[in-house]
Amino acid sequence: MTAIHINAVNKVFASQGGEVVALRDINLEIASGEFICLLGPSGCGKSTLLNAIAGFSHPTSGRILAGDKPVVDPGPDRGMVFQEYALFPWMTIEKNIAFGLEVAGRSPAQIKERVDFLLNMLKLQDFRARFPKELSGGMRQRVAIARVLALESPVMLMDEPFGALDALTRRNLQDELLKIWKEFGTTIVFVTHSIEESVYLADRTIVMTYRPGTIKRDVPITLERPRDPADPEFNRIKRMLGELVMEEQQRHENAERLTATAD
Ligand code: ADP
Ligand code: MG
């Protein structure tokens, strides 16, 4: 079954220096339960594509379906986790997780059961009465994930969610995310510019080109989990993806050099 269907999507931004073609002719089918990474250097359109799937912005042309419904705006069927923890600073952790359920009109008993379950699952029980600013970055990102899981969104969209974390915390959260993904059968679209992270996590890594953002390569990763970054096959894939990303990084730098000379 297809969870997300992306068909001939283009996105053009009007900016001061003229038009920026952020996405060109993106075609992608994401199967239900699949873990997809969007990989590429900064500026290649990863967030633009993710925001279009989320319904925060609209393609200039083409269309996106979630299940069999056209995406017109954000919805509880597509939860988003940002790099910057988009938590309500004035609410406790517990309230932050419960918020979406309250808005959805669930009963207090249902909300309590769900929130307790998630606090336990994400090892946040001892922090339920704390406020976001009292938590570490890794903990806050756990809360952001719990908030999306609270709504039982079948699709989770994640924009460099672990980019600001130290290496150890990052690996822990990656492992927890994989556990959640397996347990809930969630479809995950995960943006990263870390090649390692994409090889560690993804069923399929989509490498994007630098401006205009197109799909450069669609790379299935079939290594068994848990994956071992010391494994030779892991490293072979990492090197192959590294070369693809490097080509685009180079194009990025050349483009900037040209702009600088033109000024
Ligand atoms: P990434 O997430 O891969 O770093 P983005 O999707 O944020 O890339 O951006 C892709 C391109 O679109 C960039 O060149 C960026 O400058 C441009 N862009 C993104 N958002 C806007 C906007 N709101 N207005 C104008 N240009 C934008
Ligand atoms: Mg981005």
Image (cartoon, helix red, strand yellow):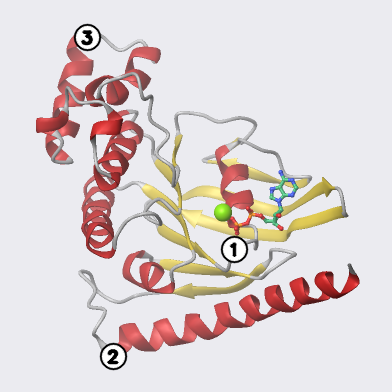
Q: Which residue is mark 2?
A: 232
Would the CB of label 1 be found within 8 Å of ligand 1? yes
Q: Which residue is mark 1?
A: 42
Above or below, 10 against 73 in this view is below
Callout 2–callout 1 Cβ contact below 8 Å? no
Give the side of residue 133 with respect to residue 23, left or right. left
Measure how far apart labels 3 and 2 are at the Cα level: 51 Å
Would the CB of label 2 be found within 8 Å of ligand 1? no
Q: Secondary structure at mark 3?
A: helix
Residue in the picture at 43% in, 68% down: 194
Of callouts 3 and 2, the N-terminal one: 3
Q: Quadrant of residue 227?
A: bottom left
Of callouts 2 and 1, the N-terminal one: 1
Residue 163 point in image, percent of width and height = 40, 57
Label 3 or label 1, whichever lies nearer to me, is 1
Q: Which residue is mark 3?
A: 108
Q: Quadrant of ligand 2?
A: bottom right
Label 2 or label 1, whichever lies nearer to me, is 1
Mark 2 crowdedness (10 Å alpha carbons): few <14, some 14-19, many ≥20: few
**Residue toward you, 150 or 168:** 168
